[in-house]
Image (spheres, helix red, strand yellow):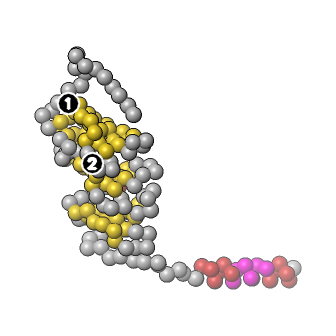
Amino acid sequence: NFMKKLLILLTALVSTASLSAQKKADWSKTFPTNINWYMITDAGTNLVATKDALYGMAPDGKELWKLDGIENIKSSNIEAIEGTPYVVLTKQKLVKTFIDVVDVITGKVVANSEELGFYTIAKRSYMPRSNRMMLYGSGKTGSYLAMVVDLANGARVWEQKSLFEKNSEQLVSD
């Protein structure tokens, strides 16, 4: 009985001591505006979204990069491409839907659908063997547009402005 009471007392003391022991934060960072959300990417970069920008933070708390002009992006409008250093940011403007593909290590926008000539993006597909992305949507003139972009350098690899032409229908995949 005495041993049982002693064991309960020791357990209570150890529990109390471990609850009161607090680890000091490894790092902290003050941002110019409130943090809306944050996430850790597959590449280990911490993405921090504020009212005015998107930040890339190293695991040690060092600011790697800042993307201005991405104000109030919602966490539902960002998607990591699994197993890569890329995230896709979806930006909607009335009926238009644009995407930016961002390298989370460098902060570089490697593909911007608006600059590539899209009015809206309907579908996108990452091709892991070639590190490319296929985009499908409508161009600025309203016509269908399909394109393959190399994510290593942002270059257009392939572009099709009119789909299903009678004199040449060919679909090729690598």
Seen from the viewer's position, the closer of residues 162 and 90 is: 162
| Disc 1 packing (10 Å; few <14; some 14–19; many ≥20) | few
| Disc 2 packing (10 Å; few <14; some 14–19; many ≥20) | some
Q: Quadrant of the C terminus?
A: top left
> Which residue type does callout 2 highlight?
Gly
Seen from the viewer's position, the closer of residues 146 and 99 is: 146
Q: Quadrant of residue 122?
A: top left
Q: Where is 14 relative to 89, above or below? A: below
Q: Where residue 140 sits: x, y (%)? A: 14, 38
Tell me the mark number nearer the camera, choosing from 2 and 1. 2
> Which residue type does callout 1 highlight?
Lys
Q: Is residue 162 magenta?
A: no
Total marks shown come to: 2
Q: Quadrant of residue 108?
A: bottom left
Q: Where is 81 relative to 95, above or below? A: below
Q: Where is 62 relative to 158, above or below? A: below
The range drawn in magenta is: 7-13
Residue 95 seen in the current view: no
Q: Image point 42% across, 52% down: which residue?
A: 84
Q: Where is 51 relative to 171, above or below? A: below
Q: State the mark number for residue 17.
A: none
Q: Image point 22% across, 63% down: which residue?
A: 68
Element assignment for label 2: loop
> Looking at the image, do the residues carrying marks 2 and 1 touch, with CB atoms under 8 Å apart?
no
Main SS category, magenta section? helix
Residue 163 seen in the current view: yes
Q: Which residue is mark 1?
A: 161
